[in-house]
Image: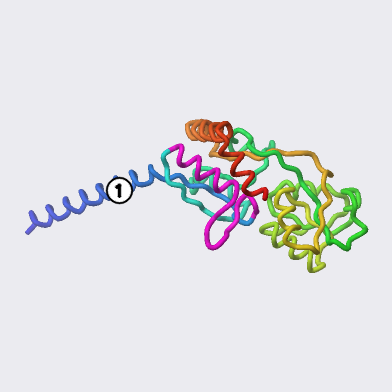
């Protein structure tokens, strides 16, 4: 009886090892991207699917690496923690390169030049430049460059939102005076909402890059190589043109 019991335990342990090995092999074929899929046209959900510039770039990069892309959608300000805890392998989320973030992550080569834009209601005649935002109620997405800029404006009341769509909806409803957000999504929101208009060219240009965990040089080099190839062979331009229409 004891012998049978020992044999069963041995078989159980062998099965567990095999399953663990198989799981590891399966994970080796997957690369996880962290994003905030509420930032059109870079990442958003359409017909139940993740789409956008970053999504298509990430899929192309995964293909170059021989991996299956898995997308983890979360709040923008949770992305760096998810990266450093190992929940995701890299972040692609229209993320601006800045000194504070560079302390916590390693950025890839830069792939997009962006700028912040002010969004106001179409009937607003009081706000024409960033100087007119003094003392105003400003909506921003948490953890973004727009948030940092709004916090520098004298006497401004800054309202944070999970995404740009929530901020623009609150703007339409008259609860805030303006929104500061990246130019490309700002244009998309304005195209879909005739009640909104843009004030462009008020802030300095910034650059987007993807991010990996600090010190993960192997993955950083792999993504950089793939991203560089996509930018040189026309794939990047095709993706950008598709979402610029």
Where residue 107 appears, x then y in whole percent? 60, 36
Q: Secondary structure at mark 1?
A: helix
Task: Name the spot of residue 18 as percent of width and height, x first.
Answer: 24, 47
Image point (80%, 64%), residue name = 195
Most foreground residue, 213 or 71:
71
Q: Please give left or right for residue 190 compared with residue 210 in the image.
A: right
- 230 relative to 127, above or below: above
Please give the name of the residue rendered at 51% of the width and 53% of the height, measured from the top-left corner.
72
Magenta residues, as a range?
39-65
User: Going by the image, does 39 lie left or right of 62?
Assistant: right
Residues 171 and 161: in front is 171
Residue farthest toward the bottom in the current orientation of the protein: 173
6 to the left or right of 130: left
Residue 9 in magenta?
A: no
Q: Is residue 45 above or below residue 18?
A: below
Mark 1 — residue? 20
179 over 212 or under it: above or below: below
In the image, what residue occupies the spot 79% across and 49% down?
117
Q: Position of residue 197 (x, y in %)?
A: 82, 57
Circle 1 crowding by C-alpha within 10 Å: few under 14, some 14–19, many from 20: few
x 84%, y 51%: residue: 199
């Amino acid at each position: 009886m004891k012998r049978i019991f020992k044999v069963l335990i041995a078989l159980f342990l062998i099965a567990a090892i095999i399953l663990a090995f198989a799981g590891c092999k399966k994970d080796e074929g997957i690369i996880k991207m962290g994003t905030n899929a509420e930032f059109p046209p870079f990442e958003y959900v359409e017909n139940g699917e993740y789409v956008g510039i970053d999504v298509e770039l990430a899929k192309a990069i995964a293909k170059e690496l021989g991996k299956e892309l898995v997308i983890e959608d979360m709040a923008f300000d949770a992305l760096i923690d998810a990266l450093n805890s190992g929940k995701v392998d890299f972040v692609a989320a229209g993320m601006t390169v800045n000194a504070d973030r560079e302390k916590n992550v390693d950025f890839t080569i830069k792939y997009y030049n962006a700028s912040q834009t002010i969004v106001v209601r179409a009937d607003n005649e009081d706000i024409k430049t960033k100087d007119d935002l003094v003392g105003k109620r400003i909506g921003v997405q948490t953890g973004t460059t727009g948030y940092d800029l709004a916090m520098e404006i004298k006497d401004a009341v800054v309202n944070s939102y999970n995404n740009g769509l929530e901020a623009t909806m609150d703007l339409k409803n008259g609860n805030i005076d303006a929104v500061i957000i990246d130019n490309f999504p700002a244009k998309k929101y304005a195209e879909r909402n005739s009640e909104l208009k843009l004030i462009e060219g008020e802030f300095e240009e910034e650059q987007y890059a993807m991010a990996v965990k600090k010190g993960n040089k192997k993955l950083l080099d792999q993504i950089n190589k793939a991203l560089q190839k996509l930018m040189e062979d026309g794939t990047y331009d095709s993706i950008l043109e598709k979402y610029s229409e």
